[in-house]
Image (tube, rainbow, N blue to C red):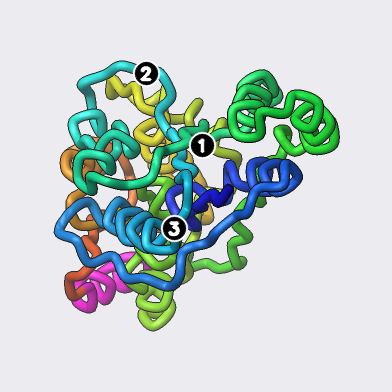
Amino acid sequence: MRIGLLDTWLAGRYLPFWEPYLEGLGLELVRPEPVEPSLPIFLPASLVAAQASNLKAQGVDYLLIPDAQGDIQSERGGAQNPWIFDLGASLARYLPGLPPMLRVPAYLSPDLVGFAAEVGQTLTKNPMLTRRVLDKTQYLLQHTPPLPKNPSSNRSVGIATLPMVQEDPRLQGGLVQALQKAGLSPFWPDIPSSRLREEGRRVEIPLDLPTDLEFAGASRYLSRLGKVRALIYLMVPGSDPIPNLARKLARRVQKPYHILNVGEDWSEALAKLAQQVGV
């Protein structure tokens, strides 16, 4: 049996368990070939769709799809964007005929051991094998992704964006290089995602989705750091209504900020930001 794995959309959060677990079950894991996000939809979803189409062409039996929002029901913030709210359902609507999806939480937790056992038994029909492999790999359910290592600089600019954008440089439009060219240092939120969600709950904007809370939490956290001189809110095509949320968050920031869109010319905005940062 062949299982297709994505290498985007928070893959670094859930694959550290699911990849060795599925491989231990004797399943063949298939990675997507290099593809470009070319569909006129939410940019991170466009990359997922391109990879899913590629994996379908490679003849996989299942697609492993992350669920970033869980069972939360909401009409606020990113929940108004069907791709952000439910990637799997949106993918099935946009690309009919895809292989069946194995939907797994995008966040690892020891509480997932029962769910993982069910998935393993469904795929292998072998409870003994599933139990044996799970015993060897369940410690990986406690895996925490490494935190960004930001350079020490007195011209640091904090970057707030959706987590699926932050964790995939292919979706950032060359922002890091553009900042460095302008003499600025990029500064990513360097605390665990759980703490970012806690920060997001302290923002006086009602939000429900974990990815929205992380975005809002990044804004609040970065705005409180003295070493961060300014903020950038990085938007990607098709990310409505997140730009509205960014504007609401920015009004609460007592530092220079710019809202930048991937695909646009940033030279004037970054030159102005460099002047505002000074030093």
Instruction: Work out whether residue 156 can be spotted.
Output: yes
x, y (%) of residue 111? 66, 19
- Compared with 175, 183 (above or below) is below
Q: Between 121 and 221, which is closer to the camera in this rendering?
A: 121
**Snapshot quadrant of residue 208:** top left
The label on residue 72 is 2
Look at the image and say whether residue 75 sits in the magenta stretch: no
x, y (%) of residue 182? 36, 79
Q: CA distance from mark 3 to mark 1?
A: 24 Å
- The amino acid marked with disc number 3 is Gly
**Snapshot quadrant of residue 258:** bottom left
> Dot 1: few (<14), some (14–19), or many (≥20) neighbours within 10 Å?
some
Q: Which residue is mark 1?
A: 106
Q: Quadrant of the C terminus?
A: bottom left
Q: Which residue is mark 3?
A: 59
- Magenta residues (range): 266-279
x, y (%) of residue 126? 72, 28
- The amino acid marked with disc number 1 is Ala
- Compared with 162, 49 (above or below) is below
Residue at 43%, 33% in the rendered image: 67
Residue at 20%, 36% in the rendered image: 81
- Mark 1 or mark 3, which is nearer the start of the sequence? 3
Q: Is residue 189 left or right of residue 176?
A: right
- Mark 3 or mark 2, which is nearer the start of the sequence? 3
Residue at 43%, 34% in the rendered image: 68
Q: Between 244 and 139, which is closer to the camera in this rendering?
A: 139
Nearer to us: label 3 or label 1: 3
Look at the image and say whether residue 271 sits in the magenta stretch: yes
